[in-house]
Amino acid sequence: MTRLNTESALPYALNRVGVLMNADPTDPLEAEGVLNPATAWGPDGELYLFPRMVAAGNVSRIGRARVVIEDGVPVGVERQGVVLSPDEGFERGAHNAGVEDPRITFIPDLGVHVMTYVAYGPLGPRPALAVSTDTISWRRLGPLHFTYQPHLSTDLNFFPNKDLVFFPEIVPGPDGRASFAMLHRPMWDLDWLRPGEGAPAPSGVADGRPSIWIAYVDAEAARRDLSALTSLRHSAPVAAPEMPFEAAKIGAGPPPLRVPEGWLLIHHGVTGPVARGFELSHGAVYRAGGMLLDPDDPARVLARSQEPWLSPETREETVGTLGNVVFPTAVERIAGTVYVFYGMADSAIGVAALERTAD
């Protein structure tokens, strides 16, 4: 395996390909945009996009669309309806509802596509899971649960959580057991929910800004029963904001991609004001970067990009429901090229090519 010095710049770049999907102005389910998609290959050999579709009132559903590929390049979509709506009680509040920001990882060892998503319920954004073998029908496994860890001196289940994504392969767990690992992004601020509560970060967490964490599932337990994927153990911080383009917060993007140096994680970094609770972060800027995780210990960062790989520049990226946003959420290899799919200003979906810049 090729190793990089932790101070090295990662030899990768993102280069725009174009806009893949815009909202359909005639469809009320897309009245407030399409954004932040997942992707999966169907049993028919076709690639499918799973966009977050936002209806009036910020009610989100997860759709399915076949990706149109011409000469190896994704150029558009053919819509095929909705696969997940906020129908369950934990996905709805008295004045809000949504299933949001899906990430899909195909895990060959289990033979299923695993979709993490954010359930926008009565207590704000909470993590949840669904699985599928055909990418058409999705079975909810329910909300995620983090096992209590005394050294953190808190219950991670108290807190809103976003940017959830599974690794595609078994990794070593901190207890030495073969494990499936998931990245997540807990948010400590509870003041928006209970005024005066503040942001009670876990014991030992000195940086309270939203950061990337990792948690693990015992692989043998998941093989016996897929519902074990909802029970996460050994949660620990991976990376806090460090570079200037990450000054406010960071979060995981697409499923980590295995590269010669280790696990390549494409992530987003945010500068500017961070909204509380249910609000949009107007005035913030979302950019994309990358970091390399150790394959023998994926909680360990080997290197990270010192500058963003993609910043909002085009009209689709700068003007929308939430301007100045590029938000990577899916990655796929098509005809030898790796493509990254990303949300544009919370309104449209773009695609960029991941390219290696040096050996």
Image: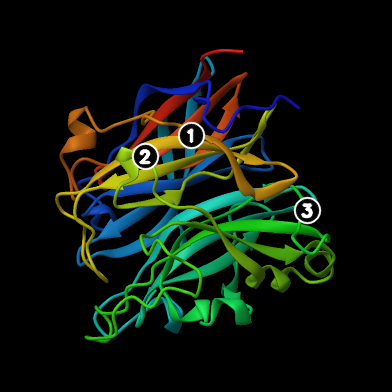
Rendered view: 10 above or below 212? above
Q: Which residue is mark 2?
A: 243
**Disc 2, SS:** loop
Q: Which mark is residue 67?
A: 1
Choose the circle earlier in sequence order: 2 or 1.
1
Say which amino acid is labelled 2. Met
Mark 1 residue element = strand
Coordinates of residue 195 in the picture (x, y in percent): 22, 85
Q: Is residue 195 above or below residue 68?
A: below
Identify which amino acid the numbered label 1 is placed on. Val
Percent coordinates x, y for residue 21 in the rendering: 34, 37
The CA distance from mark 3 to mark 2 is: 28 Å
How many residues crowd mark 3 within 10 Å: few (<14), some (14–19), many (20+)? some
Left or right of 188 in this view: 152: right
- In the rendered view, would you say 342 is above or below 172? above
**Left or right: 337 with respect to 188?**
right
The answer to whether any part of residue 74 appears in the image is: no
Residue 173 versus residue 94 in the image, above or below: above
Name which residue lies at 29% across and 85% down. Answer: 197
